[in-house]
Image (spheres, rainbow, N blue to C red):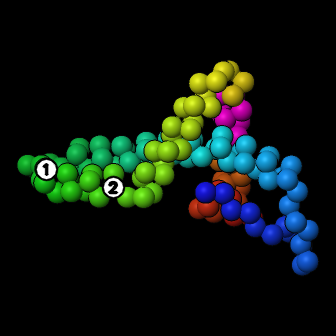
Amino acid sequence: MLEFINRRGDPPFAPFTSDELDTAAVYADAIAPLVNAYESAKLLRNLSTKVLADSGESDLAAMRAWLASTRDSAEHRERMDLAILLREVAGRGDAERKLCRELLESIVRFSDEKGETSYLSF
């Protein structure tokens, strides 16, 4: 999902141009799958941590319930959709993969500088 927020400054805000909207959509399409891939990796890390931390007998029923609830969530489905988009963009060629990497690295740097949990908080 892509959300446009008012421009900086005082109202009245100038409307976004169609070129600005198109450019934002291109970036969103490129970035969204990468965010999903990150979230999927985090999910796998959490699962492996849960499995490795279990020093006794595994409670497989509880683990299966946890996985099912995670997998069935709308957030997880959206992340998987994003991963598919990333694979599609990255599969188009070297230039596309390079653009995706540069965009993601820029987002991470921006987020680190802002020290906020949302990548897109201004």
Q: Which badge, 2 or 1, comes first in the chain's sequence?
A: 1
Q: Which residue is painted at 80% across and 46% down in the image?
A: 23
Q: Please name the predominant secondary structure of the magenta segment in the image.
A: helix
How many marks on residues? 2
- Is residue 111 among what the camera can see? yes
Please give the residue where the numbered disc 2 appears in the rendered image: 72
Magenta range is 97-103
| SS assignment at label 2 | loop
Q: Position of residue 73 (x, y in %)?
A: 37, 58
Q: Is residue 118 left or right of residue 27?
A: left
Q: Which mark is residue 60?
A: 1
Q: Is residue 89 left or right of residue 42?
A: right
In the picture as drawn, the residue positioned furthest to the left comes out as 57
* Mark 2, other Cα within 10 Å: few <14 / some 14–19 / many ≥20: few
> Magenta stretch containing residue 102, yes or no?
yes
- Is residue 38 among what the camera can see? no
Q: Position of residue 11 (x, y in %)?
A: 89, 78
Q: Position of residue 74 (x, y in %)?
A: 42, 58
Q: Is residue 105 above or below residue 116?
A: above
Q: Is residue 38 left or right of residue 115?
A: left
| SS assignment at label 1 | helix
State how far apart marks 2 and 1 are (Cα): 18 Å
> Magenta stretch containing residue 13, yes or no?
no
Tag 1: amino acid: Leu
Viewer-nearest residue: 64 or 44? 64
Q: Which residue is painted at 57% across and 31% down in the image?
A: 88
* Mark 1, other Cα within 10 Å: few <14 / some 14–19 / many ≥20: few
The image quadrant where one finds the N terminus is bottom right
The image quadrant where one finds the C terminus is bottom right
